[in-house]
Image (cartoon, rainbow, N blue to C red):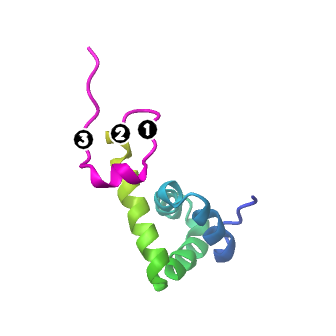
């Protein structure tokens, strides 16, 4: 996939591939690369305007925020959704 950060449709297609990672990356890219901020903001407006996409975006941001709390190699499954998040065990 080729990502064009000036094209909101390209950004949206890229985000949908891995929303739990790409949502937070979009927010960072908009700040770090102002030359692409207009395209990113337009894509984010499209996401926010669609209730299902917005829910996916918000969930992705939540998962990204919780990622440091998961042990390495952990993949979330449907069973994990019923379990509270917990910090990984420390190895001494």
Give the SS element for disc 2. Answer: loop
Whether 58 is among the magenta residues is no
Cβ–Cβ under 8 Å for marks 3 and 1: no
Q: Quadrant of the N terminus?
A: bottom right
Cβ–Cβ under 8 Å for marks 2 and 1: yes
> Which residue: 44% across, 75% down?
54
Residue labelled with disc 2: 70
Q: Quadrant of residue 92?
A: top left
Magenta extent: 70-92
Q: Residue furthest front?
A: 79
Report crowding for label 2: few under 14, some 14 to 19, many 20 or more residues within 10 A (C-alpha): some
Q: What percent of the width, then of the height, locates residue 3? A: 70, 62
Q: Quadrant of residue 72?
A: top left
CA gap between label 2 and label 1 equals: 6 Å
> Which residue: 43% across, 38% down?
74
Residue labelled with disc 1: 74
Q: What percent of the width, then of the height, locates residue 87? A: 25, 37
Whether 73 is among the magenta residues is yes
Residue labelled with disc 3: 86
């Amino acid at each position: 996939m080729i990502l064009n950060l000036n094209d909101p449709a390209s950004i949206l297609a890229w985000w949908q591939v891995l929303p739990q990672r790409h949502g937070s990356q979009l927010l960072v890219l908009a700040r770090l690369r102002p030359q692409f901020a207009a395209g990113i903001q337009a894509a984010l407006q499209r996401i926010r305007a669609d209730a299902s996409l917005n829910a996916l975006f918000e969930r992705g941001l939540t998962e990204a925020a919780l990622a440091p709390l998961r042990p390495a190699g952990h993949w979330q499954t449907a069973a994990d959704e019923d379990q509270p998040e917990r910090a990984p065990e420390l190895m001494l």
